Amino acid sequence: MFRLVQVSAKAMKRIDRTQVWELPIPTRDGKFIARYSDKGLCELNFPSDEPPPRKKARAEHLPEQIRRWHVVATEALETALKGEAPKELPPFDLSSGTEFQRRVWTAMQKVGAGHTCSYSELARASGKADAVRAVGGACGANPIPVFVPCHRILAANRRLGGFSAGLEWKRKLLAREGMDLPLVLKA
DNA sequence: TAAGTGCGTCGTT
DNA sequence: AACGACGCACTTA
């Protein structure tokens, strides 16, 4: 049901994280994988075709706090996948990002469901008006997609732009939020 | 209009 | 030093 994930030494050094809990969130769109550090939700992965690591799961006691966060995250994801704004979210641990990336992710969270914003607008909002392309990189590095709504960031002229998890997901998420997709169908 | 090219710009690896 | 989930000007067809 849940596993305690070993984090590589390199990652540990980078994000100062000793242990991460990995739990599935089954949805009608597939099985998402959530990861929690002691600070909050630190990663959300889209359903993948890849089989889960067969590593033997050590039986560990799931901390009460993690369990509560997971209940909240599960409910929130279900709501978000319907295109609605979750009433409550778990705390986020975005410590894996650089200063610049965190600024971008923070600005991104102000774009509400059913709204969009361009990469250049996001660059401006992040305090680096000319770092438009770097903003794209930061979007791609977003560890908590859906909740940190990188899918609402479009290219100029309302073109779709890119999406790490695949443009189909970006289209789907925007469509569920009621966006007019004919305008943005073309990448 | 649509599609392709080149270049500026800048954070990240 | 090279590479982008970009943007814009500018060329072609």
Image (spheres, coloured by chain):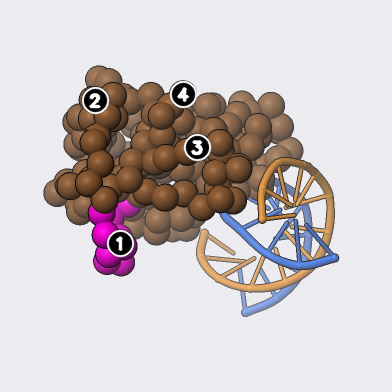
Chain colours: A brown, B orange, C blue
Q: Secondary structure at mark 3?
A: loop
Distance, label 3 to label 4, CA atoms, is 27 Å
Distance, label 1 to label 4, CA atoms, is 38 Å
Distance, label 2 to label 4, CA atoms, is 30 Å
Q: Amino acid at mark 4?
A: Lys
| Magenta span main SS | loop
Residue under pointer 2: A64
Q: Is residue A39 left or right of residue A75?
A: right
Q: Nearer the viewer, residue A173 or A70?
A: A70
Residue under pointer 1: A55
> Is residue A32 visible in the rendered structure shown here?
no
Give the extent of the magenta segment: A46-57
Label 2 chain ID: A
Which of disc 4 and disc 2 is earlier in sequence?
Answer: 2
The extreme top residue here reads A87
Q: Say which residue appears at 27% left-offset and 64% top-offset.
A: A54
Q: Residues within 10 Å of mark 3 (few under 14, many from 20)?
A: some
Q: Secondary structure at mark 1?
A: loop
Q: Say which residue appears at 34% left-offset and 30% top-offset.
A: A113
